[in-house]
Amino acid sequence: METPRHPLPPGAGRGETGSGGRRRCPYRAAGLGASDGILQEGAENSRRQLLIEAFVSAGRVDNITMVMGLHPQYLSSFWKTQYLLLRMDGPLPYHKRHYIAIMAAARHQCSYLVGLHMGEFLQVGGNPAWLQGLHCAPQKLRNLNEINKLLAHRPWLITKEHIEALLKTGENSWSLAELVQALVLLTHYHSLASFVFGCGINPEEDQDGEHGCRPPSPHSDSSPASDDGVGGSGGKDAMQEVEVLMERMKLLQESQLEEEGVTQEEMATRFELEKTESLLVAPSDIADHSLQSNVLCFVEDPEFGYKDFTRRGEQAPPTFRAQDYTWEDHGYSLINRLYPDVGQLLDEKFQVVYNLTYNTIAMHCGVDTSMLRRAIWNYVHCVFGIRYDDYDYGEVNQLLERSLKVYIKTVACYPEKTTKRMYTQFWRHFKHSEKVHINLLLLEARMQAALLYALRAVTRYMT
């Protein structure tokens, strides 16, 4: 089955962007808002300017940019980070950066990104023979295969021994600075593959002539429900979903104001319950993606994939307590020391998406969506085994209904299995730009989770 194709609007920039907050403020304390609302001239102008810049710099505007452009503040931050990773001075030569991007995208069978970076690899002088497959690449790049595999599917298995093996002396060894750049590139492209599949983004015509060029979306930012012709009782059900969500948010906010204390033991129990319940959240209509030859040649051990870490009868790895190794206090400073500018840009990008809000939910305006954004972010981290001691995971069950959980887990953990039906089944009365916002959250939450595991292993190696 081909990549799912969802209609996503190329036009209609959204309302005011939320504030980014102080640099390096803890994301759990900030809010995350569903995105949409009244069209603001400032945002539309910002979006138009970004698309013009993309065309001038690259001679084209790709579909990822078109879809991300629904949220100009985020797109600007994303671009700065990706430009630094691929185009600015750094430890790795340019052609090897694109080859690492190919290796990462291939783990998730993302032919869109593989094809894009094969072209970029050749443009910066890469050896065409390497594109015959991973077996034709230098041993130093092939040595990344194991950590690429773990970062993509089971990052909690990464240990300081994996880092040590790559840094050991010899002609194929990596320097610490090179390895940190490679780790950021791998997590960046694993997560970007999630965004591509989650939004059903199609290849451009000049990249993949076989499929022809289809715009990534319709011209209006209607809700998926209206696109699918959901009327009558289906439309009423979708409307009711919005009202139920609004009511649950209101009740949770009220209970927090009343300061009903929850013990640490109860908080830990609720996390374990949510983690266990996530085992049962599996899609019923998994897409069948047969590996294309241009992708398969870059993948060793293609059967290795995401595996729930708390299966019955198996020894589960210890939960990653977020407070023990945080992005704010540990990951950020380590990256800034070893790869200076990228730490600042990653920090900005995480904050922008976590704090992004237009204070709207579907047809409702003036809504504080921080609770909802936090639930989505923390649920992604939960399925990767990361727990926040100060978060009540009971909120996840209150705010995220089953179809949304299925979508989140699929896009974050095995994005190649995403289907259009999963996309249309959750939040049926929300607009496409709001669903794109969810995908931006998934992209960044997933990237931060994998980076935390990798950087923790680097820190342990260094100490």
Image: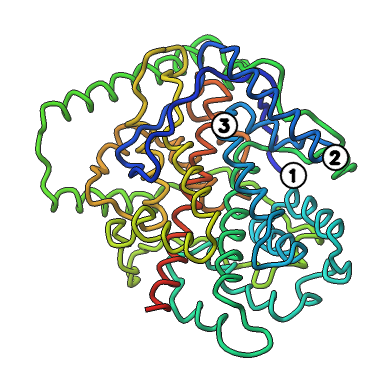
Q: Which residue is mark 2?
A: 211
Q: Where residue 115 sits: x, y (%)? A: 80, 52
Residue beneath label 3, please?
436
The alpha-carbon separation of the residues under discs 3 and 2 comes to: 23 Å
**Quadrant of the frame with the C terminus:** bottom left
Residue at the (77%, 64%) spot, across then down: 95
Q: Disc 1 marks which amino acid?
A: Glu
Q: Amino acid at mark 2?
A: His
Please tell me the numbered disc located at residue 22: none
Q: Is residue 251 above or below residue 20?
A: above
Here the colouring is rainbow
- What's the distance in space between the residues labelled 2 and 1, CA to CA? 10 Å
The crowd level at tag 2 (other Cα within 10 Å; few <14, some 14-19, many 20+) is few
Q: Tell me if label 1 and label 3 are in contact, CB under 8 Å.
A: no
- x then y, percent, for residue 326: 34, 57
Relative image position of residue 76 (x, y in whole percent): 61, 35
Residue in view at x 86 percent, y 37 percent: 205
Q: Secondary structure at mark 3?
A: helix
Contact check, label 2 and label 1, Cβ < 8 Å: yes
Q: On the image, which quarter does residue 136 sit in? A: bottom right
Q: To which quarter of the image does residue 460 belong?
A: bottom left
Q: Position of residue 101 (x, y in %)?
A: 69, 59
Q: Pick the residue in front: 335 or 103.
A: 335
| Secondary structure under the numbered disc 2 in the rendered image | helix
Q: As drawn, is 137 to the left or to the right of 81?
A: right
- Circle 1: element type: loop
Q: Which residue is mark 1?
A: 2
- The earlier-in-sequence mark between 1 and 3 is 1
Q: Is residue 179 above or below residue 235?
A: below
Between 122 and 428, the one lying in front of the other is 122
Q: Earlier in the sequence, mark 3 or mark 2?
A: 2
